[in-house]
Amino acid sequence: MPELPEVETVRRRLLTCLPGLVVRDVVVNDATVSAQSETELRALLAGRRVVGLRRRGKYLIVDLGAVERPRAAASGLGAGPTTTVIHLRMTGQLLFRPGPADRPPRFVWRLDPQTDLAFQDVRRFGRLWAFDPAAEEEFFARMGPEPFGDAFSVAYLRRALEGRSAPLKSFLLDQRRIAGVGNIYADETLFRARLHPLRAAGSVGPREAQRLHAALLETLQAGIDHEGSSIESFVDPAGQRGSFQEILSVYQRTGEPCRICAATVRRLEVGGRGTHYCPSCQPRRGGMSRGSRRLRGSPVPPRGGKPPDGAPPRG
DNA sequence: AGTGGCTCCTGGCGGC
DNA sequence: TGCCGCCAGGAGCCAC
């Protein structure tokens, strides 16, 4: 399921071939893919050249320039530049050469020179938006900072965690706090940070917050380096699968031995989402490390107090 | 405001 | 073999 590393992988692949092409036409085969009609989308996209590819969280942004020959554009909606946004959600795929499929792509961009960019999406959760670039800020107004951006500092993370009773797992999945984290990278991040997914976000101490910050960046970067996780159906626009799923520590490894300590990986449900963790590396009580059994059963540190955190850095 | 639960959607899978 | 029901989850919506 496409999260930040998968969307970034798609962006990088598209970057090698999409910019410079001109959208000649838009075909919508499934009207639920966009709140806008095929006619509206055509008016906003057709005749425009792809001038940029960006990513915001799990959203892929395709920047289109102004119509170069205005007479060719549909009238009524102007001919200025357009920002298009695509969310792949669970099973969305942008493909240049779609394989045989039971159903037609949900939408197709017909490009010049002769190329089709097709959006295949079995579960039909994916979405497409198109709007004036001036509306972009409002579109993303409620989304939290980019993990790799300057705004996502340890200080920011500590402020965001402060006072929250929600479990860490739910906190990481909340796009208003941090952009781009989904179920796979949330579980893997908490494992790397040695934090239990049910720990209240507000119970995380300063050193734990620092660990969580580092773990998130390391986990996401590893995902990007491996060109994403192909757990269900993720493939990049050339049809290539990522390999991050081959090095997962806990996600979907229920019942298997932890790669660090050999304890059995467990599964529980948090906020309706399957959640995987190592009960030994990620103890329920704050900050307790493997081997720090003397602390087992000790009370949760008072809020704002310094939690026990003598865990050695994991190497 | 924060939090949790429900909903959408469909292929795959286990159980009978 | 065939059918039924459950499971996966991103994000919007709603209730409390």
Image: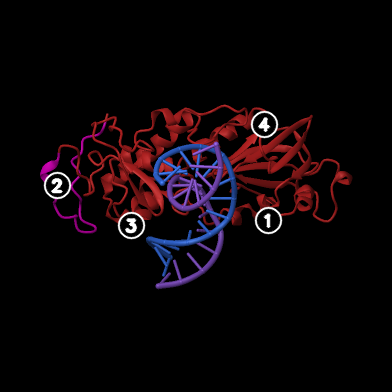
Chain colours: A red, B blue, C purple
Q: Residues within 10 Å of mark 3 (few under 14, many from 20)?
A: some
Q: Which residue is located at x 45 percent, y 33 percent?
A: A223
The amino acid sitting under disc 1 is Ala
Nearer the observer: mark 3 or 1; the answer is 1
* Subunit under mark 1: A
Residue ID for mark 4:
A100
Determine the CA span between mark 3 and mark 2. 25 Å
The amino acid sitting under disc 4 is Pro
Residue ID for mark 2:
A296
Q: Are dots 1 and 4 in contact, CB under 8 Å?
A: no
The numbered mark, 3 or 2, whose residue comes first in the sequence reads: 3
Determine the CA span between mark 1 and mark 4. 27 Å
| Dot label at residue A35 | 1
| Same chain, labels 3 and 1 | yes
Q: Is residue A32 left or right of residue A23?
A: left
Nearer the observer: mark 2 or 4; the answer is 4
Q: Are dots 3 and 2 in contact, CB under 8 Å?
A: no
The numbered mark, 2 or 1, whose residue comes first in the sequence reads: 1
Determine the CA span between mark 3 and mark 1. 37 Å
| Same chain, labels 4 and 3 | yes
The image quarter containing residue A45 is top right
| Dot label at residue A162 | 3
* Subunit under mark 3: A
Q: Residues within 10 Å of mark 1 (few under 14, many from 20)?
A: few
The amino acid sitting under disc 2 is Arg
Range of residues picked out in magenta: A292-314
Q: Secondary structure at mark 4?
A: loop
Locate the C terminus of chain A and report the quarter of the image it occupies. top left
* Subunit under mark 2: A
Nearer the observer: mark 3 or 2; the answer is 2
